[in-house]
Image (cartoon, helix red, strand yellow):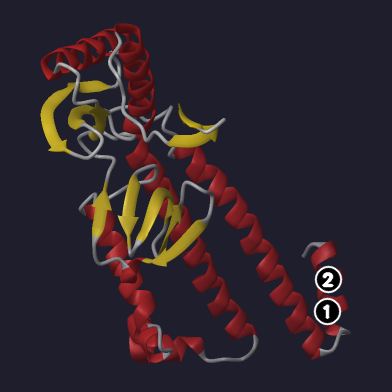
């Protein structure tokens, strides 16, 4: 027998039983900590979007990576917990044999945990959303930052992380599929020729789509007059771009339309204030 093992056995024999149990529990925790670190590195290496080619998209690979991490974590928690209970003298074998793993979980009041895990599998199987998608779930809107077996983490555009149990997800709105709409309105003065205005809008939209073609799915165009308000005629514009590209595209298109309106002399109405003041017994007016 190895001399080191003999010496270790002798040293453990001289320790109190409680100290030996504590040492074994510490070793179990250390071993599973190392396994957790190595397992995460292995998962990251195997489920790397740059290494995987074929039918899986990057967002799908990232989702599977998050689920694999979650599965590894809970497996380590369960196995390590059982081993620690055994060191403490708890008869885990008889408990598991008598009730089964699922029965044990339900017996400890973990019905919600089981529901969260099952719902997580269905979300993945049905491809309702994936990591990187912009969604609304349980009243929270943001990007899917992480998806695990039990919880989904949503990051809002202001940076907050919302942690939602999968079992609470009953309705999902996914904005990252098919395309995102470029939809906004512009108002021009009643004195303007509306046919000319619509022509200028369509020309500007077409020119921008030619200069920035990558995100465009359906070229934006003027749909027509949608309102005759107090300040002028309102024209609605609609187009379709790649998912989540609509915010930046809309901002740029608005800026170009304003510049083009100014160039050709189309007035964008805005509130004016006229102040009347008396000067030497008479009245004069200044418009602001």
In terms of image quadrants, where is residue 218? top left
Image position of 99 (left or right of 156): left
Q: Nearer the viewer, residue 198 or 1?
A: 198
Q: Residues within 10 Å of mark 1 (few under 14, many from 20)?
A: some
The x, y position of residue 267, in whole percent, is 30, 20
How far apart marks 1 and 2 lie (CA) works out to 6 Å
Above or below 264: residue 34 = below
Q: Nearer the viewer, residue 195 or 126?
A: 195
In terms of image quadrants, where is residue 54? top left
Q: Which residue is mark 1?
A: 12
Q: Which mark is residue 239?
A: none
The x, y position of residue 18, in whole percent, is 78, 89
The x, y position of residue 146, in whole percent, is 45, 52
Residue 242 is at least partly visible in this image:
yes
Above or below 8: residue 37 = above
The x, y position of residue 264, in whole percent, is 29, 7
Q: Quadrant of the N terminus?
A: bottom right
Image position of 73 (left or right of 192): right
Q: Residues within 10 Å of mark 2 (few under 14, many from 20)?
A: few
Above or below 173: residue 247 = above
Residue farthest front in this picture: 281
Q: Residue at x 25, y 67 (%)?
A: 170
Residue 288 is at least partly visible in this image:
no
Image position of 256 (left or right of 27): left
For the residues bearing labels 1 and 2, Cβ distance under 8 angstroms: yes
Q: Considering the numbered disc 1 on the image, is that residue within a helix, a strand or a loop?
A: helix
Q: Nearer the viewer, residue 86 or 107?
A: 107
Q: Which residue is mark 2?
A: 8
Q: Nearer the viewer, residue 205 or 144?
A: 205
Above or below 256: residue 113 = below
Image position of 124 (left or right of 112): left
Q: Residue at x 51, y 56 (%)?
A: 161
């Amino acid at each position: 027998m190895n001399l080191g093992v003999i010496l270790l056995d002798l040293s453990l024999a001289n320790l109190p039983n409680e100290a030996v149990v504590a040492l074994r529990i510490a070793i179990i925790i250390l071993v599973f900590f190392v396994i957790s670190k190595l397992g995460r590195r292995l998962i990251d290496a195997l489920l790397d979007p740059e290494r995987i080619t074929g039918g899986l998209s990057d967002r799908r690979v990232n989702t599977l990576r998050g689920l694999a991490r979650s599965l590894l974590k809970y497996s380590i928690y369960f196995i390590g917990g059982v081993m620690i209970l055994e060191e403490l003298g708890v008869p885990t074998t008889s408990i598991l044999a008598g009730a089964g793993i699922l029965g044990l979980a339900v017996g400890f009041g973990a019905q919600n945990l089981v529901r969260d895990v099952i719902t997580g599998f269905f979300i993945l199987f049905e491809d309702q959303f994936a990591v990187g998608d912009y969604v609304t779930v349980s009243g929270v809107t943001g990007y899917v930052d992480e998806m695990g077996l039990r919880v989904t983490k949503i990051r809002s555009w202001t940076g907050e992380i919302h942690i939602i149990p999968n079992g609470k997800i009953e309705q999902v709105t996914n904005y990252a599929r098919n395309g995102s709409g470029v939809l906004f309105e512009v108002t021009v003065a009643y004195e303007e020729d509306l046919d000319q205005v619509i022509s200028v809008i369509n020309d500007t939209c077409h020119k921008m789509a030619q200069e920035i073609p990558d995100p465009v799915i359906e070229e934006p165009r003027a749909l027509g007059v949608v309102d005759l308000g107090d300040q002028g005629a309102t024209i609605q514009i609609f187009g379709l771009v790649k998912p989540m590209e609509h915010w930046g595209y809309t901002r740029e298109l608005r800026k170009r339309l304003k510049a083009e309106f100014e160039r050709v002399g189309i007035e964008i109405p805005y509130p004016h204030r006229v102040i009347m003041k008396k000067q030497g017994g008479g009245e004069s007016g200044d418009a602001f």
